[in-house]
Image: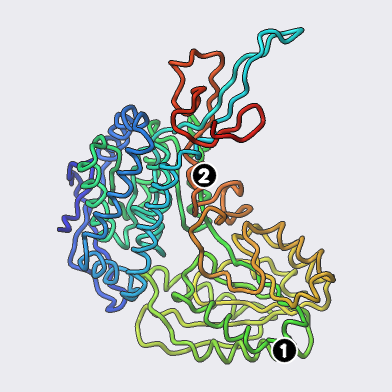
């Protein structure tokens, strides 16, 4: 049942007087549910309860936390069609997307459970002491990762499951041993409440302390600001705009005790398409990229918003083909009116910019919140002269930049800010002549693709979903894949401790049977 109230641990609370509704973007009407904005006292209660729960939860074994994560997945699955229907009602996304994203979310939870069951994630490192060493004895040192404390997670609008209430930030934090307080996204608050109920039920079934998870409703910025500034919170996960992300990073840095804010923000994901590839397969690439630009109404953080090539007949033909294929694409419903309005405003700014040639623009759409695809073309000179052309337009939009030469292509790449992804479309035979271009592209991104489209993020250990600022606030960390856990932990060294007092991961006999680095060599002995 959807109550519209906040979860303070397992307690349902609605102290405030401010209420709001979500929107059905397909029908462009308000949904029937009313949600109560969390008050200052409720935010404080959730954070304090998380801090109390942490003192118990951090001592739970990897196996216990793994059981909890798997139970969350089971409870999400048990919500059945009600969860799917609520998701589609609040997001405008189709049922197939909802089911796929639910599967990904459960898969992420199970992946972290498997990581915990394996046990190696703690990065146990042992350097044996040598009391006979001269001129000074060598101490016995043993190091491992430990949880940092309660984490605040901001639900993302574009992935109501996979990057929200029980998404990657929450799953990785819970895996690390950190309680989570979620600030639910206001546009899918009902979806968030249902998922929250599943997490609470899983905690109760598996003996996890109350307060390990809370969910707070909020339409404005006050709740989020209070959470980030609360002394009980030790880290923050955020996916959203550059403006909001930078504000949260500043809040975290300016606390009396600064904390890390891991923010995924903006990215235009440059694609470099080389001449020979256009000669051999230009039409096929035009078709593939038209689909990628419009996938999910362009509401992916990896959407290809910038395509770079060297002027010539091949690039000219590619631009016409891409425009034709994009023009055939239907306009899809966007997540909510605010996103649709921001998209139309950003798109219009690009269409009106000096030097812009409009190659494709959809003028009509069925729904009021449909995102109408568009493609523009500019010269390398104009792109370099106007940094406003470098901005992200979040939606089904892309810009083709025609560079005069390889030298200008390099200049354009070097002028870009940090990005999540960069793609190279090329024939293998021409790559050797563009190694400097590849190097420039790699220096700007967290993931570099060869002959593919960037939309779609595989959840696996080798995935890095992060990149240089401003795509993320810290390029060293990922929000997708097993390594996401390392945002919520810190290393601690034990020096000269008695064996019986050491954590199991660091005991000499290795009772957990995990892979450890011992005196410079990896071993399970």
Q: Residue at x 26, y 46 (%)?
A: 38
Give percent across and percent down for residue 143.
Answer: 55, 26
Q: Nearer the viewer, residue 509 or 284?
A: 509
Give percent across and percent down for residue 288.
Answer: 57, 82
Give percent across and percent down for residue 205.
Answer: 20, 43
- The residue wearing badge 2 is 249
Relative side of 468 to 230, left or right:
right
Q: Quadrant of the N terminus?
A: bottom left
Q: Quadrant of residue 361?
A: bottom right
Q: Residue at x 57, y 75 (%)?
A: 349
For the residues marked 1 and 2, what is the alpha-carbon distance in whole angstroms?
Answer: 42 Å
- The residue wearing badge 1 is 316
Q: Quadrant of residue 23?
A: bottom left
Contact between labelled residues 2 and 1, with CB atoms less than 8 Å apart = no
Q: Nearer the viewer, residue 326 or 142?
A: 142
Crowd rating for badge 2 (residues with CA inside 10 Å; few <14, some 14–19, many 20+): many
Crowd rating for badge 1 (residues with CA inside 10 Å; few <14, some 14–19, many 20+): some
132, above or below 113, in the image: above
Give percent across and percent down for residue 119.
Answer: 46, 38
Q: How many marks?
A: 2
Residue 507 numbered tag: none
Q: Earlier in the sequence, mark 1 or mark 2?
A: 2
Q: Quadrant of residue 160?
A: bottom left
Q: From the image, state whether disc 1 or disc 2 is nearer to you.
A: 1
486, above or below 314, in the image: above
Asked which secondary structure carries label 2, the reply is: helix
Q: Residue at x 24, y 41 (%)?
A: 206
Asked which secondary structure carries label 1, the reply is: helix
Q: Residue at x 35, y 83 (%)?
A: 367
């Amino acid at each position: 049942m959807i109550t519209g109230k906040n979860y303070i641990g397992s307690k349902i609370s609605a102290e405030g007087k401010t209420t709001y509704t979500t929107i059905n973007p397909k029908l462009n009407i308000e949904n029937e549910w009313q949600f109560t904005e969390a008050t200052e006292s409720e935010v404080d209660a959730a954070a304090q309860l998380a801090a109390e729960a942490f003192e118990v939860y951090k001592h739970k074994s990897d196996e216990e936390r793994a059981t909890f994560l798997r139970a969350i997945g089971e409870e999400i699955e048990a919500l059945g069609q009600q969860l799917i229907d609520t998701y589609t009602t609040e997001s405008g996304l189709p049922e197939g997307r909802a089911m796929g994203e639910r599967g990904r979310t459960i898969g992420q939870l199970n992946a972290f459970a498997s990581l915990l069951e394996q046990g190696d994630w703690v990065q146990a490192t042992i350097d044996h002491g040598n009391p006979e060493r001269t001129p000074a004895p060598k101490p016995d040192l043993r190091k491992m990762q430990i949880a940092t404390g309660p984490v605040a997670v901001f639900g993302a609008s574009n992935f109501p499951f996979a990057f929200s209430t029980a998404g990657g930030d929450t799953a990785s934090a819970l895996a690390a041993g950190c309680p989570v307080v979620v600030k639910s996204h206001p546009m899918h608050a009902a979806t968030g409440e249902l998922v929250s109920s599943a997490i609470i039920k899983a905690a109760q079934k598996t003996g996890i302390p109350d307060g390990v998870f809370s969910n707070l409703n909020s339409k404005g910025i006050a709740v989020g600001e209070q959470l980030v500034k609360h002394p009980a919170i030790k880290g923050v996960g955020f996916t959203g705009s550059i403006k909001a992300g930078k504000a949260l990073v500043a809040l975290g840095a300016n606390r009396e005790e600064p904390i890390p804010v891991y923010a995924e923000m903006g990215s235009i994901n440059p694609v470099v398409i080389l001449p020979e590839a256009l000669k051999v397969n230009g039409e096929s690439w035009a078709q593939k990229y038209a689909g990628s630009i419009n996938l999910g109404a362009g509401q992916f953080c990896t959407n290809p918003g910038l395509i770079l090539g060297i002027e010539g007949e091949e690039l000219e033909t590619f631009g016409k083909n891409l425009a034709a294929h994009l023009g055939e694409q239907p306009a899809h419903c966007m997540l909510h009116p605010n996103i649709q309005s921001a998209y139309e405003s950003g798109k219009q700014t690009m269409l009106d910019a000096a030097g812009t040639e409009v190659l494709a623009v959809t003028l009509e759409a069925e729904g009021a919140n449909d995102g109408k695809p568009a493609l523009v073309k500019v010269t390398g000179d104009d792109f370099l002269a106007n940094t406003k052309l470098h901005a992200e337009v979040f939606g089904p939009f892309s810009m083709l930049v025609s560079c005069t030469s390889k030298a200008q292509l390099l200049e354009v790449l070097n002028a870009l800010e940090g990005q999540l992804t960069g793609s190279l479309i090329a024939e293998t035979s021409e790559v050797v002549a563009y190694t400097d271009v590849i190097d420039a592209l790699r220096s700007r991104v967290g993931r570099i693709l060869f002959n593919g489209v960037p939309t779609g993020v595989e959840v696996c250990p080798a995935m890095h979903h992060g990149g240089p600022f401003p795509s993320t606030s810290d390029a060293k960390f990922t929000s997708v894949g097993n390594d996401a856990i390392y945002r919520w932990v810190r290393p601690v060294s034990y020096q000269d401790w008695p064996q019986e007092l050491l954590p199991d991961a660091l005991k000499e006999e290795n009772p957990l049977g995990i892979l450890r680095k011992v005196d410079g060599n990896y071993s399970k002995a």
